[in-house]
Amino acid sequence: MVWDDTDAAPKKRPDFELGADLSKLSVAELAEYLEVLAVERQRVEAAREAKQRSQSVAESVFKKS
């Protein structure tokens, strides 16, 4: 038997674009888009928090007494 990995290939996610016409998306695609946005929001919040920590450390090092 020959292994055919075409069936095992991960399904390509549709590309979502901020501001795109949502009327063209199905209910399932809208749900997936919300999941993608939630993950992206967590990623952005983590980056912001890391930068805030770095900024706080820098401010404390260079703070004038």
Image (cartoon, grey):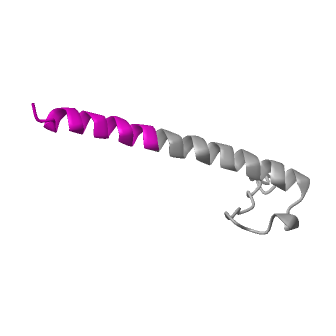
Left or right: 63 with respect to 45?
left
Residue appearing at x 30%, y 40% in the figure: 55
Q: Nearer the viewer, residue 9 or 26?
A: 26
Left or right: 35 with respect to 1?
left
Main secondary structure found in the magenta portion: helix
Q: In the displayed structure, would residue 14 be above or below residue 31?
A: below
* Direction left: furthest residue: 65
Query: Measured from the top left, where is residue 35 in percent x and y?
Result: 73, 45
Quarter containing the C terminus: top left
First to last magenta residue range? 48-65
Left or right: 64 with respect to 36?
left
Residue appearing at x 54%, y 43% in the figure: 43
Left or right: 60 with respect to 40?
left
Query: Measured from the top left, where is residue 46 in percent x and y?
Result: 49, 39
* Direction right: furthest residue: 27
Q: Is residue 63 magenta?
A: yes
Q: Is residue 60 magenta?
A: yes
Residue appearing at x 25%, y 34% in the figure: 57
Q: Nearer the viewer, residue 20 or 11?
A: 20
Residue appearing at x 29%, y 35% in the figure: 56
Q: Nearer the viewer, residue 46 or 58?
A: 58
Number of marks drawn: 0
Query: Measured from the top left, where is residue 33 in percent x and y?
Result: 75, 53
Query: Measured from the top left, where is residue 4 in percent x and y?
Result: 79, 54
Q: Quadrant of residue 23?
A: bottom right
Residue 50 seen in the figure: yes
Residue 10 seen in the figure: no
